[in-house]
Structures are given as C-alpha cells and as structure tokens.
Image: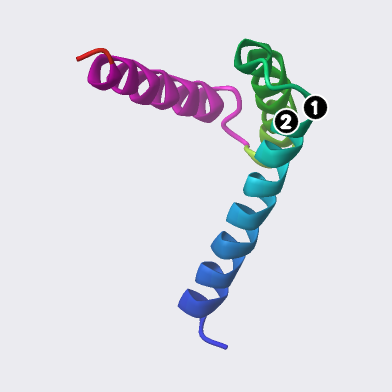
Amino acid sequence: MQPTLIQERTNQELQTLINEVCQAMDDSTHNVQSWAEHITNLLDCLEFHAMANDPNHPEQFERMLARLEEQIAARLRHRSR
C-alpha cells in the first residue's frame, strides 16, 4: 500500500474514532456546556503524549494550542454574524 493511501486510511480511522467519542459525549449528557470539561481532558491527554513524543515540548504543543485558539476565535467571529 502506498504511503499516501495509508495516511488517508489512518486519517479516516481517526475521524471515525473522533466521531465515536463525540457521540459518547452527547450520549452522556446533552448539556453542551459540560463538554468543555471533556475537551480539556482531551487536551491534557494530548499534552501527555506530546511530552512523550515531541523533543520540542512544550513549544510545539503551545504552538498547536495557539493555532487552535485562533481557529476557535475565527469560528466564534464567523458564527456571531
């Protein structure tokens, strides 16, 4: 299998898992505001993995958080119109 196809398959599998996690969050509570705690837990878990795998931790993780912050801000601006 070519590397691009493997990457696409991996991304599809990851997206499937993400969808399953989102469904589980919704199943556990329909209180959307409470999802923030779960998302924070996800970020904590991702940082743990970043520490283990990224020789430039915390710099790269903090860059990712800054990018995420920008994307959230843009989404909020777009939705508020």
Residue 58 position, x and y percent, is: 59, 22
Displayed quadrant of residue 37: top right
Q: Nearer the viewer, residue 56 or 45?
A: 45
Q: Which residues are magenta?
A: 55-79
Q: Secondary structure at mark 2?
A: helix
Instruction: Indicate yes or no whether the magenta region holds residue 3.
Output: no
Task: Kindly identify the amino acid type of the residue bearing the numbered disc 2.
Answer: Met
Displayed quadrant of residue 72: top left
Type of colouring = rainbow
Q: Nearer the viewer, residue 11 or 4?
A: 11
- State the residue position of label 2: 25
As displayed, is residue 33 above or below residue 63? Answer: above
As displayed, is residue 31 above or below residue 75? Answer: above
Q: Name the disc covering residue 28, or none.
A: 1
Tag count in the figure?
A: 2
As displayed, is residue 54 above or below residue 42? Answer: below
- For image coordinates 67% across by 15% down, the residue present is 31
Q: Quadrant of the C terminus?
A: top left
Task: Kindly identify the amino acid type of the residue bearing the numbered disc 1.
Answer: Ser
Q: Mark 1 touching mark 2, by CB under 8 A?
A: yes
Displayed quadrant of residue 38: top right
| Horizontal relation, residue 43 to residue 28: left or right | left
How much space separates mark 1 and mark 2, taking CA atoms? 5 Å
- For image coordinates 70% across by 31% down, the residue present is 26
Majority secondary structure of magenta residues: helix
Instruction: Indicate yes or no whether the magenta region holds residue 59.
Output: yes
- For image coordinates 58% across by 54% down, the residue present is 15
